[in-house]
Amino acid sequence: MKKLLHGIVDFRKNVRPGYKETFGRLALGQSPDTLFIACSDSRVVPNLFASTEPGDLFVVRNVGNIIPPCGADGLSVGDVSEAAAIEFSTLTLRVKDIIVCGHSECGAIRALLEEQGSNPAVHLRAWLQHAQSTLKEFQSGVRMNSTLSLLNHLSQLNVLHQLENLRTYPEIRDQIRTGQLKLHAWWFDIANAEVLAHEASEGKFVVIDEKEAERILSRIDGESRCP
């Protein structure tokens, strides 16, 4: 708490003057172009590793970067907070991209992997039920990178499964079909401070360096021009 308070005082004295105009403009409304779904883990800081400014990202953070799927009735089968964020960002803010970003050494994924039925964190166990499909595929032997630990294999696989959960939402399917929306799978390697993106053609996550960034942007641009 002491560090937070000192940080606020420092922001007010040294940072706020340079951002007053920005926040004054943002007070009138927001127009982020990306919904960023990340884990609540304190080591994952999207605005830092993506070098974004206030107003750039609409962010959802929860334990394990999980999105409960949508049922046949069009309603989320889990906590409606994530569903509300999806609706607001796609139907009202009209974001063009949704990124699901997992990370290495994820505590939620560790709990999923260990499947501790006696874990006293009953709400955590209930929440992780929305990642059971990830665990089942993992247990079937699916692997993407032989250099990763089992925990990080499962973490990367979970990101891909959350994209599939997103596609169960009618508004997501409709906007993907019309080319208004694109989904992306990212993964943050904490130890190396590297952000990786999933490349379907290679079947794995690769570091987002200059070359990979250009490849992603070129693909997006090409898809945008398609009728």
Image: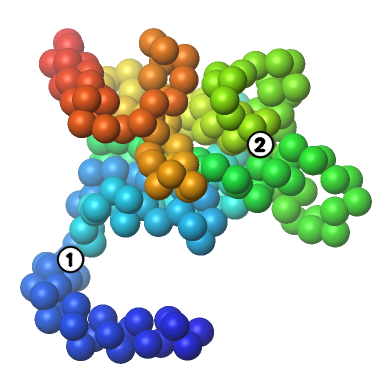
Residue at image position (85%, 53%) is 119
Question: Dot 1 corresponds to which residue?
Answer: 26
Q: Which residue was labeled with disc 2? A: 151
- Examine the rendered structure and indicate whether residue 19 appears above or below residue 11: above
Left or right: 29 as drawn, with respect to 50: left
Q: Position of residue 162 (x, y in %)?
A: 53, 33
Amino acid beneath label 2: Leu
Q: Secondary structure at mark 1?
A: helix
Residue 105's spot in the image, x, y percent?
60, 45
Whether residue 213 is situated above or below residue 59 in the rendered picture: above
Q: Which is more foreground, mark 2 or mark 1?
A: 2
Q: SS class of the residue under badge 2? A: helix
Residue at image location 35% in from the left, 44% down from the top: 35
Q: Give the camera-side residue of 147 and 21.
A: 147
Are the two marked residues, 2 and 1, in contact with CB atoms closer than 8 angstroms?
Answer: no
Q: Position of residue 7 (x, y in %)?
A: 35, 82
**Side of 154 relative to 205 (left or right):** right
Against 222, residue 187 (above or below) is below
